[in-house]
Image (cartoon, rainbow, N blue to C red):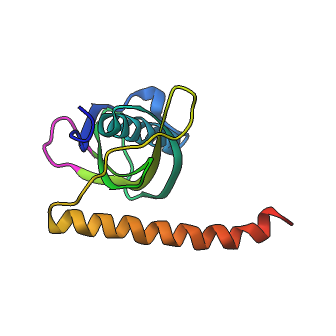
Amino acid sequence: MPGQDRELTLRFLAEPADVNFGGKVHGGAVMKWIDLAAYACAAGWSGKYCITVYAGGIRFVQPIFVGNIVEVSAKVIYTGSTSMHIGLDVRARDPKSSERHLTTHCVVIMVAVDDAGRPSSVPEWVPQTDEDIKLRDSAITLMEMRKKIGQEMEAHVNS
């Protein structure tokens, strides 16, 4: 039922096909996993097909190694009328250890669309805890910052 599944975690093993030239998991593979988890989270919250409209603030904190167990956790942190801001953390660990470490963090904005591809309304998410309020407020601050950055970028786009 829409408006109930706010978060999810995808878990899997990093495979040899995910490796880059430096012998670690390729950043592009991590970004794909982030997009998949963001989609699954947004679709679960909205009950609709969703598209990615923004991925930003991606921080690659530590590398992921082939054979690591990877966990991509996604959580709705703000909703607009048709959009959902999804906070994502990627953690990894050696399968022989229980110690996980943060490898990547970012925010992805997804928009729910109808069968014609037009934006479609989503259930409102209302923060319940102090932590949820902090996440929502952070999403709003980031949204305001993106607007300012977009205005600054106009000079580069139109030159």
Asked if residue 6 shows in the view, the reply is: yes
The picture quadrant where one finds residue 118 is top right
Residue 69 coordinates in the image, percent (x, y): 26, 36
Above or below, comparing residue 136 to residue 116 in the picture: below
Residue 128 coordinates in the image, percent (x, y): 16, 60
Within the magenta stretch, is there residue 93?
yes
The quarter of the image holding the N terminus is: top left
Q: Main secondary structure of the magenta part?
A: loop
Residue 18 coordinates in the image, percent (x, y): 46, 32
Asked if residue 68 shows in the view, the reply is: no
Seen from the viewer's position, the closer of residues 87 and 151 is 151
Residue 74 coordinates in the image, percent (x, y): 31, 45
Locate residue 86 relative to residue 32 in the image: left or right: left
Q: Which residue is drawn at 38% across and 59% down?
A: 61
Seen from the viewer's position, the closer of residues 53 and 22 is 53
Give the extent of the magenta segment: 92-100
Q: Which residue is drawn at 24% across and 67% down?
A: 133
Within the magenta stretch, is there residue 69?
no
